[in-house]
């Protein structure tokens, strides 16, 4: 597999990490197992990646969660730990946007539900509000795709500055 396949796997890892902090049932264990197997096929193995690949499909998240978190950490996409706070959760989600694992629409739903009032927003939050508004206002698939690319670029810069 080429660089595109590795980029896709990185996007999948970032999204798995984000699923730990987004509302909902958490990451899909079966998807984590598949991603781990694909990482092994790319010689991107770590001890926890091997452990996730060895899980049985259908393993409940309560049993698989710790080893999936270990894999994500070892692969460079740590999920915010419980109790980390909003800033850690936001960084985890922003990393998924930056990697291309999270679509603009899903980020819109998460972000607009968490963004503080305008007078309490920092520069990044204000920039993201404007970008998401531009994305919503687009009427063509090409326009939406371009605005989503702008959003990913800002997310990449923010993650790089934070890291």
Image (cartoon, helix red, strand yellow):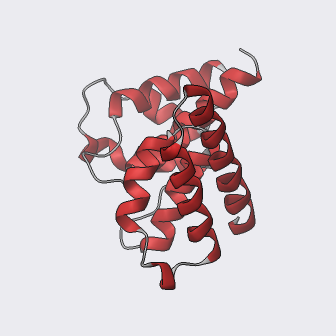
At a point 57% along the width and 50% down the height, the residue shown is 134
At a point 45% along the width and 64% down the height, the residue shown is 89
Position of 129 with respect to 157 (left or right) is left
Image spot of residue 103 (x, y percent)? 50, 39
At a point 50% along the width and 72% down the height, the residue shown is 87
User: Of residues 49 and 131, which is closer to you in this image?
Assistant: 131
User: How many marks on residues?
Assistant: 0
**Residue extending furthest toward the top:** 1
User: Of residues 20 and 48, which is closer to you in this image?
Assistant: 20
At a point 35% along the width and 41% down the height, the residue shown is 27
State the quadrant of the N terminus: top right
Image spot of residue 83 (x, y percent)? 37, 73
Residue 43 shows in the view: no
State the quadrant of the C terminus: bottom right
Image spot of residue 18 (x, y percent)? 45, 50
User: Of residues 25 and 48, which is closer to you in this image?
Assistant: 25
Position of 59 with respect to 141 (left or right) is left
139 up-or-down from 82: above or below: above
Position of 68 with respect to 128 (left or right) is left
Image spot of residue 24 (x, y percent)? 26, 48
122 up-or-down from 115: above or below: below
User: Of residues 88 and 133, which is closer to you in this image?
Assistant: 133
Residue 109 shows in the view: yes
127 up-or-down from 49: above or below: below
């Amino acid at each position: 597999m080429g660089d595109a396949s590795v980029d896709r796997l990185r996007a999948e890892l970032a999204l798995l990490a984000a699923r730990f902090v987004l509302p909902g049932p958490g990451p899909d264990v079966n998807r984590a197992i598949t991603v781990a197997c694909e990482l092994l096929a790319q010689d991107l193995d770590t001890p926890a990646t091997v452990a996730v690949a060895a899980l049985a499909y259908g393993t409940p998240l309560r049993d698989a969660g710790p080893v999936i978190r270990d894999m994500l950490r070892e692969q460079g996409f740590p999920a915010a730990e419980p109790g980390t706070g909003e800033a850690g959760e936001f960084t985890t989600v922003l990393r998924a946007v930056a990697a291309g694992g999270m679509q603009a629409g899903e980020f819109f739903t998460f972000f607009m539900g968490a963004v503080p009032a305008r007078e309490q927003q920092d520069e990044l939050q204000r920039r993201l509000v404007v970008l998401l508004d531009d994305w919503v206002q687009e009427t063509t698939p090409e326009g939406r795709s371009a605005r989503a690319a702008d959003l990913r670029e800002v997310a990449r810069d923010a993650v790089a500055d934070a890291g």
